Image: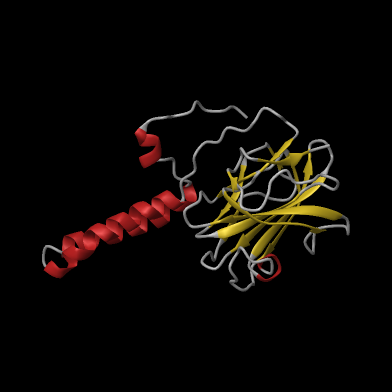
Amino acid sequence: MEESKPDFSNKAYLLPHINPEGVKFGAIALCAAVVVAVLAGHIPFLAYFVLPLFLLAYGVFLFFRDPDRYPPEDEKAILSPADGRVCLIEECELPDGLQGESRHWRVSVFMSVFNVHVNRMPTAGEILKKEYIAAGKFFNASLDKASKENERCNYLVKADNGQIYGVTQIAGLVARRIVPQVEDGQKLLRTQRFGLIRFGSRLDVYLPEGVKPEVRIGQIMVAGETVLGHLA
């Protein structure tokens, strides 16, 4: 995948690229702010809400920001699919509905509302199976039980070297909508976008069998850049 040149201008920070999924939400918030601003000319007390509403609209747009990422040249590196912090690391089986009873190291990345929520492929590979589970509870995404109780979407992936691993998008306490953007059989490049989650959530990566995590709990992750481990 061809990489864009880094933009170090202030505009890149203040007016970043917005994922198309977020345009409608930002537009709704902006329209609400404009309506209140217009009405404030006739109803004076509404003037107190104008600035907060415009700031809220700006915040909604920022939530859906989708900056470019610059992966390491090491093609064997398994990269974090999400921004955030590592909240769990444990050895376990793949999620129910995927395949096998083999043990995999699971690395869980918690995303707060302040993180970028666009998710990227850890390695180049093929989506062998996608399983979306809509019904669920809304436990805090940092809790272990969220991986079995909350709304989630599981992916079984076959890396280009043949190794199998899993990825799970998990809705959180505030998030109520997972947006998968890939289908079974689709082949994706490393760091290619495969979906997003709205308003706080978690990503689980089930590393290929035999691959150990190279991160630790509390470490800050950058999607498409931070190395979780290495393919055989």
* Residue at 41 percent of width and 40 percent of height: 16
Q: Is residue 180 left or right of residue 30?
A: right
Q: Position of residue 127 (x, y in %)?
A: 74, 47
Task: Establish if 141 lies above or below 72.
Answer: below
Q: Position of residue 63 (x, y in %)?
A: 45, 52
Q: Is residue 232 left or right of residue 134?
A: right
Task: Establish if 55 lies above or below 40.
Answer: above
**Could you tell me if residue 43 is visible in this image?**
no
Q: Is residue 173 left or right of residue 106?
A: left
Q: Position of residue 103 (x, y in %)?
A: 85, 55
Relative depth, front residue between 159 and 130: 159
Task: Establish if 101 lies above or below 182.
Answer: below
**Could you tell me if residue 147 is visible in this image?**
yes
Colour mode? secondary structure
Q: Is residue 103 left or right of residue 31?
A: right
* Residue at 68 percent of width and 66 percent of height: 144
Q: Quadrant of residue 9?
A: top left
* Residue at 50 percent of width and 25 percent of height: 5
Q: Position of residue 232 (x, y in %)?
A: 84, 37
Q: Quadrant of residue 17?
A: top left
Count of labels in the image: 0
Farthest residue to the right: give it. 101
* Quadrant assignment for the N terminus: top right
Relative depth, front residue between 1 and 146: 146
Q: Quadrant of residue 42?
A: bottom left
